[in-house]
Image (cartoon, helix red, strand yellow):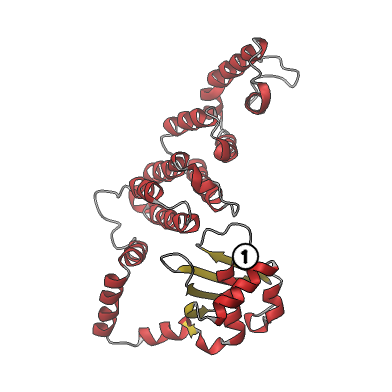
Amino acid sequence: MKKLEEMTREDVRKLADYKIFERGVEYFAEGHVIEPSVSGNKLMAEVEGSSYRNYRASVELANGQLECKCDCPYDWGTCKHVIALLLHWVKKKDDFEDLGHVAEKMEKMPREDLLKILRRFAKDEPQRFAEIVDLALVGEIADETKAPDFVKKAKNILRNGDDRRISDVVRRVSIIHEQALGRFKSNGANYAADQLFRIACAFLDAPWVCEDSKGEGIGLVSELLDDVRLIWMNHKISKKEILDETWKIINADTTLLTDSFDDFFESICKGEWERKIMRKPIIQRLIQLEELENRGRQYKSYRYEQTLHFARKFGYISQKGVYIQD
């Protein structure tokens, strides 16, 4: 499929099993799709569900593939809310407001009219308004002497989030992620690396966010750690604390996030300094795990193999298991 305009009912039918599709048909027929809009190759709308609030659904066509998203708790593929949105598009394209045209109109509107819109938006949707303002004004507030604590914001979102609305929680923390990156230039590499790393660590106290089948939570943690890695490799920063904390985390067996922090640890231990710092802790941990195994504790499994991998990768022992002198 090259264009959204080419989509047919049969195309929509193929996106979900029969039961979900039929529920989507019902939602469309009953008028559950509210204020649908289109922007380029992306469709968006709120869809009324069985919850006390509406769900936000979107579909974007990129490289011939549809990317469907919804902040409902359904985690097994395309949900009925997305199906309803797509059926509305197939049957009633004229209902969709073209946001591109709206933007063009707003550029020509008097300042006072724009302010009225902003005031109404701030009153009706204070949370979304605050998120947009934070992103839009990053450059304007770059000279503030006190850098904001994005970690605290992220922790509040994760602490107060609803495990039935994981996508919404991930979306809100993603905005915090973007805000922290936006303050990178003004507040320095140490600030950015520390904030991004600690936002990733905050997910350790909210593992339920990483338990969704869509993988959005784990994906965001990986993105956060990847940005820390880029800063680590390209800027002079105080690294010891992050290195120590990462080593502590990966030895705590953090289940769903173990792979993310393992990969991050290996990716930042590229230089001579990192490998020198980690030589003693890794060898000590390896010996400890070997002793546990000898006592019948049966601990060698994954953590032992991963620690052994680090020791070989960083040049502490030979492939035959012989310790190499520093």
Q: Is residue 192 left or right of residue 275?
A: left
User: What crowding class fits label 1: few (fewer than 14 Cα within 10 Å), some (14-19), or many (20 or more)?
Assistant: some
The answer to which quarter of the image holds residue 133 is: bottom left
Task: Look at 50% across and 78% down and name the residue there.
Answer: 33
- Looking at the image, is 195 positioned above or below residue 110? above
Secondary structure state at the residue bearing disc 1: loop
Q: Amino acid at mark 1?
A: Thr
Residue 110 visible in the displayed image? yes
For this rendering, which residue is in front, 201 or 293?
A: 293
Where does the C terminus fall, quadrant-wise? top right
Task: Look at 62% across and 83% down and name the residue there.
Answer: 90
Residue 305 visible in the displayed image? no
Q: Residue furthest right?
A: 320
Task: Look at 63% across and 61% down and name the residue there.
Answer: 77
Where does the N terminus fall, quadrant-wise? bottom right
Residue 62: give x, y in percent of width and height.
63, 70
